[in-house]
Amino acid sequence: MPILLKNLTSGELHAALASRGVSLRLARRLQAAVLRRDEFPAELPEVSGQLLKQIRAAVELPRLEVLDRRVSPQDGFAKVLFRGAGPEPFEAVEIPLAHRPGQEKTIVCLSSQVGCAMGCAFCATGRLGFVRNLEPWEMVDQVVQVAAVARHPVRGAVFMGMGEPLLNLDAALRAARILSEPCGPAIAAKAISFSTAGVAAGIRRFAAERLPYRLIVSLTSADPARRREWMPAAAPLPELLDALREYRAATGRRVTLAWTMISGVNVGETDAVQLAEWVRGLPLTLDLIDVNDATGRFRPPGPEELAAFRDALRKHLKMPVARRYSGGQDIHAACGMLAGGAEVPRG
């Protein structure tokens, strides 16, 4: 079996090629060529052509096929439709961030699975069901391919696209390590986020291994019956809270919860009270995200409903609350809208 580049850290690549005379330094140079320029080098200073030929015969440089790329004229978000090791397409989103002139950057929202087994009612990916896990190289190459055409350098990656990354955690963690290597994309570990709908075992692993990546837990409701209705495969609230307390104790980090706001469903004062009671004593930050639903079944709150909910959170929760912008709605690139190109001809 050939050695798959983009599927190994530089240390793993060195171990795989050491018997052929490849040093760790050379493995890092190869990794840099593959992950920064998406090519196997034709030549390298101080490396014989014969050795490079031997290495080339032992490795394979896989690439995702780009099926479609759409850019929002409203906010510049771009959605890319890929095909990888299997026939099923999946998507990534290019997120442009412009802070100050000269500090513009790109964040890649990448997929970890084709489809998703979590079945969240307000998520287009969840309605697809689970198809398969992506391999590490398929996650890494989403970033490589986006970086090749992005206007600004890629400085962050979020495992928030299609799939539940904590159900494909070994592969996703390997991808994150590759993305953060200095000889690769060099994305800082603190700029890599994992978003989960509530997989308690994965959260406990984040705690036990003190993983350096940011963890975001989608909550959406602190009412057990309502959360079970909208997020049927997520951990029950008592189990989830135990895992979050374990994470807090092990890492000392403030827990980040995401709240998908649905008009008339989870943006009342009762919801704020339930949340405050559920997390009592647990330091957290709450990210508020508008629901995005192309079917029209779910709608985000209007200005008055949102203002009232934020007032209720200030009154009862008394924790930091942030409104997170979810762009690319017009091209179905926003949070909860990725559906593997269902609206795009698959070629």
Image: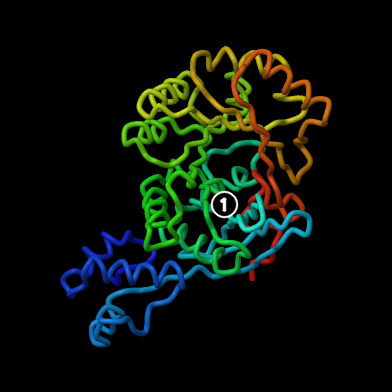
Query: Residue 257: x percent and y percent?
Result: 56, 30
Q: Is residue 332 left or right of residue 224?
A: right
In the image, what residue type sits under mark 1? Answer: Cys
Label 1 element class: strand
38 and 98: which is toward the camera = 98
**Quadrant of residue 260 within the rendered picture:** top right
Question: Considering only vertical position in the picture, is 46 above or below 269?
Answer: below
Residue 61, by quadrant, is: bottom left
Residue 336 image offset from top left, x and y in percent? 65, 44
Looking at the image, the residue that sits furthest to the bottom is 49
Residue at x-position 76% and y-position 34%: 300
Residue to which mark 1 is pinned: 109
Please say if 183 is above or below 337. Answer: below
**Residue at 56% of width from left, 54% of height from top?**
108
Where is 220 relative to 101, above or below? above
> At which x and y percent is residue 48?
24, 85
Q: Position of residue 230 (x, y in %)?
A: 63, 30
Q: Furthest-front residue in view?
A: 101
Q: Is residue 296 left or right of residue 81?
A: right
Residue shown at 25% from the left, 81% from the top: 47
Residue located 57% across and 53% down the image: 107
Q: Nearer the viewer, residue 158 or 65?
A: 158
* Circle 1 residues within 10 Å: few <14, some 14–19, many ≥20: many
The quarter of the picture where the C terminus appears is bottom right
- Rendering quarter of residue 249: top left
The quadrant of the image that shows the N terminus is bottom left
